Image (tube, rainbow, N blue to C red):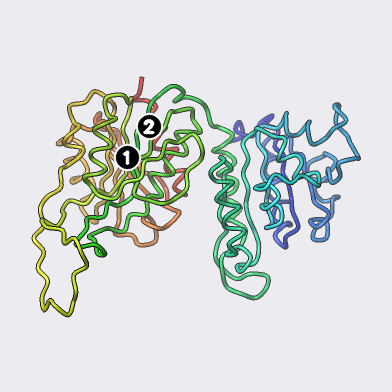
Amino acid sequence: MMDVFKNKKIALCVCGSISAYKSVDLASKWVQQGADVKVLMTKSAQKFIGKATFEGITHNKVIDDLWNNESDLNIDHLDIAKNSDLIIVSPITANMISKLAQGISDDIISTTLLATEKPLIIAPAMDGNMYDHFGVKNNIEILKKNGVIILEPESGYLASGLIGKGRLRNLEEINNEVKRVLTLTDDFKGKNILISAGGTREPIDAVRFIGNRSSGKMGHSLAEICLQRGANVTLVTTSDLSVPMGIKKISVSTAEEMKSEIIRRIDSVDCIIMAAAVADFKPEITNEGKLKKDDIEKLKLNLVKNDDILNLIKDYKCIKIGFAAETNNHDEYGVKKLNSKCLDMIVINDVSNNQIGFESEYNQVKIITKKGDIFKTDIENKKIIASNILDKLKTLIK
């Protein structure tokens, strides 16, 4: 891992939060592994931790003002915006999130962020009520859609004494995300990748439906990482999760709608990743209006099978990756699906562990290729899992 950080230029921006002290540990780790770390601080951040601490660790002057310039350009924010390999704001406050989303530049950090085209990671930290405010939520959605990498805060005990979502993300996870971004390549440049995500909904009547617990987060993570690695990405999804600009998002609801959109596009892709949880069955008859419970003593549903999308596309020449959600006999069922659907690779989720998968930001999977290669991940953030899957895909796609 030493080589990941060696000679990399990292700009660490620190805003005014009680968790500002944690960024010292991040800076120290990166410097020890060979990175050149430059720290930018707001005036509020210096109320929590002094410049001398960061300067002693990074051996660089802390930049906290637009007018006290140290760079060769004599314009520090432009120098950092242009020459950094990565910029991370940890912690970032509601105030700085708002500035970044709305294009306001009135201090060294906000001006630098607006001037850069480099990869940008932000790690929010604030009181739970602040994080749940509609203004903050809307601004975060704007940033997500524009490709900013958001490390969502954790839930737990907050400085205010409340219990809620707002704690700075675990430092190990922040470090892992920085590693991932620093090692990004455009190894999928020019490749057309089609991804399905989310759980389909099969209507019973105008209100009710048969569904499943899939959140779509794994498929959306795959789409985002594919985009970051240079691919042309089309995402067919049932989820209302936002996606970065550059991903072509097609919203569907039912298995039939998903099938139609995939069949329409399958001829022009290099790879399809079927991460969606497509319902196996649907009601034979859908009531056009709402069924009234007062009129029905017992409701009987006749279910019929949906078309198996992977089975329909098994003869197409593109690389095909399937997902299998299993509670037992994972390898047996996974390999059976791999072979019967003529897949190049299958990703097996153990859905018996209710601490991961579905709505969780974390997952653990086993990847099996048609050549018999087997790789099991640790429990990781879904973006790390997505990177692992794409690393395996890289060996298959030409």
Does residue 240 appear to the left or right of 75 in the view shown? left
Q: Residue 341 at what x, y percent from top left?
A: 17, 35
Residue drawn at (15%, 47%) of the image: 306
- The answer to which quarter of the image holds residue 87 is top right
Q: Residue furthest front?
A: 289
Q: Amino acid at mark 1?
A: Ile
Q: Nearer the viewer, residue 78 or 179?
A: 78
Foreground pick, 183 / 242 = 242
Position above or below: 122 against 193: below
For the residues labelled 2 and 1, the Cα–Cα distance comes to 8 Å
Q: Is residue 151 left or right of residue 389?
A: right
Q: Which residue is mark 2?
A: 392
Mark 1 — residue? 367
The answer to the question of whether label 2 and label 1 lie on touching residues, with beta carbons closer than 8 A, is: yes
Q: Helix, strand or loop at disc 2?
A: helix
Q: Is residue 101 left or right of residue 338?
A: right
Q: Residues within 10 Å of mark 1 (few under 14, many from 20)?
A: many
- Where does the C terminus fall, quadrant-wise? top left
Mark positioned earlier in the residue sequence (2 or 1)? 1
Residue that sits furthest to the top in the current view: 398
Residue at the spot x=53%, y=43% of the render? Answer: 145
Tell me residue 77's x, y (percent): 79, 36
Location of residue 2 (image quadrant): top right
- Position of residue 287 relative to residue 160, above or below, is above
- Which image quarter is the N terminus in? top right
The mark found on residue 34 in the picture is none
Rendered location of residue 190, percent (x, y):
44, 21
Provide residue 4's location: percent of width, then percent of height: 60, 33
Identify the secondary structure beneath mark 1. strand
Please name the amino acid that badge 2 sits on.
Lys
Q: Residue at x 38, y 39 (%)?
A: 235
